[in-house]
Amino acid sequence: KLLYLGLLNAQEKWTMPIQSWNLTLSQLYIYFEGRLDNVITL
């Protein structure tokens, strides 16, 4: 829950795409297996 809320808060301030964001999302998806299914679609 904190990760999701933190991402939402930080997302408002982002103006440029993050390098290797797809790799980061994949790693978060593995680390938080099953918890991000409702939030992130890969």
Image (spheres, rainbow, N blue to C red):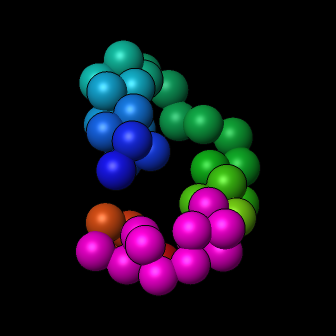
Viewer can see residue 19: yes
Residue toward you, 19 or 9 = 9
Q: Quadrant of residue 7?
A: top left
Q: Is residue 26 above or below residue 16?
A: below
Main SS of the magenta part reads: loop
Q: Is residue 5 left or right of residue 22?
A: left
Where residue 25 appears, as percent x and y from the top left, is 59, 60
Q: Nearer the viewer, residue 11 or 37?
A: 37
In which image quadrant can residue 24 be found? bottom right
Q: As rendered, which of 40 and 14 lies closer to the eye?
A: 40
Q: Is residue 24 found left or right of 3 in the rendered image?
A: right
Q: Is residue 26 visible?
A: no
When the figure is inspected, residue 41 is found, relative to residue 18, above or below; the finding is below
Residue 20: give x, y in percent of width and height.
71, 49
Q: Relative to residue 21, is residue 12 depicted above or below? A: above
Residue 15: x, y in percent? 42, 21
Number of numbered discs on residues: 0
Residue at 53% x, 36% y is: 17
Residue under the point 66% across and 74% down = 30
Q: Quadrant of residue 9?
A: top left
Extent of the magenta region: 28-38
- Does residue 7 sit above or below 13 in this rendering? below
Residue drawn 43% across and 72% down? 35
Residue 42 percent coordinates (x, y): 47, 78
Q: Nearer the viewer, residue 42 or 8?
A: 8
* Relative to 19, 29 lies left or right: left
Which residue ends up furthest to the front in the rendered image?
Answer: 1
- Residue 18 shown in magenta: no
